[in-house]
Image (tube, grey):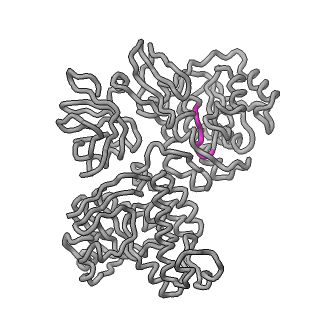
């Protein structure tokens, strides 16, 4: 009997506890596997190729429930939650990026989410970040020991000839003693320790992008995985702590970026406005805190809907500039936009302007942002106006031209609550009679004296009270069994959950004996499939006849 419980997620990567009768292991981990699974010592280690057909694989893949349980992309196998599965020959998948992603998606879809994934003979210092990033938890020393036997010197940056150890690039005990085997094992363990740090801080993607630069196949896996949106999107939280570093071409395809752009186009409800102004972004976030945007806002004076054109997000409405990741991304500023950036940003602008038809669209832009806006205007047959701002949109003449262009236009009634709720919950909230107290980042929404929402300063999302949820009558619900939550809600207590729920989403919990508000700690589909782990971090609980607890 074994158990597996995730305590921290970063996409597919997990920090978890895995317990067997012999050991209690904190994952991800590199272990002497025959000490954990004695049955491996008696295995003939059948190496069924990953591309084998279902008949061949089913014939030769070891069966039974002795752990680790052997699994294969072509074989359906019943696996109990809490078990450890082993994917034989997974090291060969690293050389076939397209199949790597295809096989991974199939295995993750079929097997319980609270299952430990073991990749035998695969882990090296140069690929363990990617292996963890793609959802593997357990590893052995086989690959580094083989490299030692072959006289190869392993580093996170790649595999090198043995004589590199004499160049002073490493000062581990193995290098000091001239023991290649010790060095390679230490390098693997050290890189895994770094991976754990990045998972804990929700920044493993940054490490993977850094490491993968040394291996074209790894770059391909990252890119292909990003494009498998149906598979990967549910695993990606709606927000992360810290900065979203958009420092590579892959940033255009990150789930957070594509999700934001899609919600701006399909969910966001803009205020009633006849005129839209396209503005450049700023290094400072939220944009309104920057000197340039203070000038832009003064020039616009509320007479148009302000839309910020930026790479990689595409388009950020002023009402959403505090919402993750609009206030949390960082990009290298060079003034140069490559063709792929312009194509992506123009597609987002075109989708937005095609859906929301404005009487006038004014581009107060320069450089690549202006080119992208012009491309978008052409796509939707829009006669866009361009202000004469040259290379300095925040200069006095440019600002005067912008103000003059808006002369006589009526004020726009912006509504941050309605805008954020539409983006966050895909629901139009009636804000009639609501008032906002406080200033960013400590903002609260009331009707009379009843608190309805507060603004999370870390994410820009709304946190509904029970009264606030009355304004959002459907969606983002978690249904629980007949119990009163006395703390966080665990997955076994969940009966059903909105499949749109992602980790970090605000949710309303409903059950026969109590209702609650809180934040999702795992995706909605995983709440329904898991046997262990926290599903919802509860903030408030209400039971009939009792005050909130």
Q: Position of residue 358 (x, y in %)?
A: 60, 26
33 relative position to 412: left or right: left
Q: Is residue 61 visible?
A: yes
Q: Residue at x 23, y 63 (%)?
A: 2
Q: Dividing the image into 4 quarters, which one contains the C terminus?
A: top left
Question: Which quadrant holds residue 487?
Answer: top left
Left or right: 7, with 373 as reference point = left
Image coords of residue 272 (percent x, y): 54, 21
Residue depicted at 32% across the width and 32% down the height = 508
The image position of residue 469, as x and y in percent, is 35, 26
In the image, what residue occupies the spot 51% across and 61% down? Answer: 222
Along the line of sight, the residue nearer the viewer: 143 or 365: 143
Q: Is residue 116 left or right of residue 456?
A: left
In this view, the residue in front, 260 or 166, is 166
Residue 51 visible somewhere in the drawing = no
Relative to residue 194, is residue 148 depicted above or below?
below
Residue most extreme to the right: 397
User: Residue 74 magenta-drawn?
Assistant: no
What residue is rendered at 67% in x and 43% in y? 372
The residue lying toward the viewer, choosing from 532 and 183, is: 183
Over which residues does the magenta segment extend?
A: 311-317
Q: Is residue 181 above or below residue 67?
A: below
Give the number of callouts: 0
Task: From this view, report whether residue 20 is shown above or below residue 159.
Answer: above
Quadrant for the N terminus in the image? bottom left
Q: Is residue 180 above or below residue 252?
A: below
Quadrant of residue 282 in the image? top right
Residue 270, horizontal then vertical, whole percent: 53, 27
């Amino acid at each position: 009997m074994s158990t597996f419980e995730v305590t921290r997620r970063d996409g597919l990567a997990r920090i978890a506890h895995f317990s067997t009768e012999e050991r209690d292991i904190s994952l991800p981990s590199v272990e002497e596997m025959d000490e954990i699974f004695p049955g491996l010592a008696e295995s003939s280690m059948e190496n069924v190729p990953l591309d084998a057909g279902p008949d061949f694989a089913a014939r030769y893949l070891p069966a039974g429930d002795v752990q680790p349980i052997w699994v294969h992309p072509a074989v359906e196998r019943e696996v109990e939650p809490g078990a450890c599965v082993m994917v034989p020959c997974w090291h060969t998948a690293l050389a076939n990026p397209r199949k790597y992603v295809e096989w991974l998606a199939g295995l993750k879809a079929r097997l319980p989410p609270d299952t430990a994934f073991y990749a035998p003979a695969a882990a090296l210092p140069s690929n363990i970040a990617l292996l963890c990033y793609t959802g593997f938890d357990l590893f052995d020393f086989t690959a580094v020991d083989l490299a030692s036997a072959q006289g190869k010197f392993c580093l996170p940056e790649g595999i090198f000839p043995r004589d590199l150890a004499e160049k002073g690039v490493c000062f581990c005990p193995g290098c000091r003693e001239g023991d290649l085997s010790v060095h390679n094992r230490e390098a693997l363990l050290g890189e895994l320790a770094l991976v754990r740090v990045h998972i804990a801080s929700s920044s493993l993607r940054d490490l993977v992008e850094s490491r993968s630069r040394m291996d074209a196949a790894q770059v391909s896996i990252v890119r292909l995985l990003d494009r498998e949106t149906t598979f990967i999107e549910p695993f990606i939280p709606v927000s992360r702590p810290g900065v979203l570093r958009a420092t590579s071409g892959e940033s255009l395809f990150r789930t957070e970026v594509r999700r934001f752009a899609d919600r701006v186009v399909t969910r966001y409800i803009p205020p009633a406005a006849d005129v839209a102004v396209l503005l450049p972004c700023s290094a400072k976030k939220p944009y309104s805190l920057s000197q340039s945007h203070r000038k832009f806002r003064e020039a616009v004076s509320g007479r148009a809907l302000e839309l910020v054109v930026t790479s990689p997000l595409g388009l950020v409405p002023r009402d959403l500039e505090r919402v993750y990741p609009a206030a949390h991304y960082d990009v290298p500023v060079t003034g140069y936009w490559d063709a792929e950036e312009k194509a992506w940003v123009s597609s987002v602008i075109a989708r937005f302007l095609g859906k929301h038809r404005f009487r006038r669209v004014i581009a107060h832009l320069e450089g690549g942002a202006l080119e992208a806006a012009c491309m978008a205007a052409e796509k939707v047959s829009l006669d866009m106006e361009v202000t004469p701002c040259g290379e300095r949109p925040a200069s006095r003449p440019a600002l005067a031209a912008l103000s003059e262009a808006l002369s006589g236009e009526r004020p726009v009634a912006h509504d941050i609550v309605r805008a954020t709720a539409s983006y966050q919950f895909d629901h139009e909230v009636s804000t009639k009679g609501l008032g906002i107290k406080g200033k960013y980042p400590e903002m609260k929404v009331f009707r009379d004296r009843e608190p309805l929402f507060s603004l999370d300063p870390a994410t820009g999302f709304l946190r509904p009270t029970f009264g606030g949820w009355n304004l959002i009558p459907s969606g983002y619900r978690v249904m629980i069994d007949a119990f009163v939550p006395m703390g966080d809600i665990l997955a076994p207590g969940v009966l059903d959950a909105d499949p749109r729920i992602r980790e970090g989403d605000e949710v309303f919990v409903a059950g026969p004996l109590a209702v609650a508000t809180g934040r999702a700690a795992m995706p909605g589909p995983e709440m329904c499939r898991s046997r262990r782990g926290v599903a919802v971090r509860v903030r408030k609980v209400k039971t009939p006849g009792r005050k909130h607890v």
